[in-house]
Image (cartoon, helix red, strand yellow):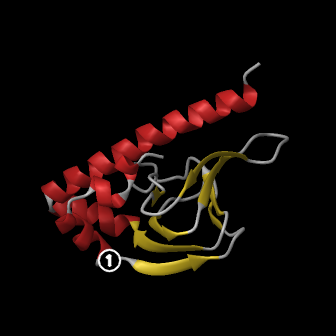
Amino acid sequence: MTSATTMNAALPAEYRERLTRTAREVSFEAGTRLFEEGRRADRLWIVRTGTVALDLRVPGRRPAVVASLGHGQLVGWSWYHPPYLWHLGAEAVSPVRAWEFDGGTVRAMCAEDPGFGRAMAGWVGRVLVERLHVCRVRLLGLYAP
C-alpha cells in the first residue's frame, strides 16, 4: 500500500484529531482474526504497530492473502458502505496495536460535518481503489496460467 492511503497522508490534522478522539486502543495477538468475509462490518481500525493480512476465501484452499497492512493504514472499509458486510477477512500476522472505531459513530460524524465527511470519503475511496488493484495483481499472480 502506498503512503497516500495512511491516515496521516489522507486526513488533515484537524480531522485526524477529531477522529482519534473517538478511538479505543486495542491489541491483537498474532493469529487473531479481526473479521471474517460475509459477516457484519461495524468497526474500523488504524494500525499503530504490527501487520494485518487481508485474505480472501478460496474454496478447497487456505484463504489467499491479498494484502498486508501496517502502520497508519486503515483496516476495513466495508463499515462505510451498505450492506455493511466484510468483503474480505483479516488476521493479525504479528502482534498488533491499533485504534478501533465504531463505524456508525464515524458515519454520523461524516453526516454532521460535510468537510469531515468529504475527507473520510476521499480516504476510504483511495483505500478501496488501492486495495482492489493490489488484490487483482495478487490474484493474477496466484491463479494466472
Residue closest to the eye, 73 or 38 = 73
8 with respect to 138 (left or right): left
Q: Residue at the location (74% across, 28% down)?
A: 143
Which residue lies at the image location 50% right of the left edge and 33% below the top edge?
133
Q: Is residue 57 above or below residue 21?
A: above
Quarter of the figure with the C terminus: top right
Give the residue drawn at x 52%, y 60%. Answer: 70
Q: For label 1, count other residues whose C-alpha is less than 10 Å away and answer few (under 14), some (14-19) or many (20+).
A: few
Question: Residue at the location (52% across, 52% down)?
Answer: 85
Residue that carries the numbered disc 1 in the rendered image: 22
Q: From the viewer's side, name the closer residue of 129 and 82.
A: 129
Q: Using the image as rendered, state which of residue 68 and residue 122 is in the foreground.
A: 68
Q: Is residue 67 above or below residue 76?
A: above
* Quarter where residue 99 is shown: bottom left
Q: Position of residue 1 (x, y in %)?
A: 48, 46
The amino acid type, in three-letter code, at marker 1 is: Thr
Disc tally is 1
Residue situated in front as seen by the camera: 61 or 94: 94
Q: Residue furthest front?
A: 3
Query: Label 1's element?
Result: loop
Residue 39: % across, % down: 59, 57
- Residue 138: where, in percent of width, then height? 63, 35
Q: Is residue 92 left or right of residue 107?
A: right
Q: Find residue 19 and report its image quarter.
A: bottom left
Give coordinates of residue 119: x percent, y percent: 23, 53
Q: Residue furthest top?
A: 145
Q: Residue furthest right?
A: 60
Q: Please determine whether, in this image, residue 63 is positioned above or below residue 136.
A: below
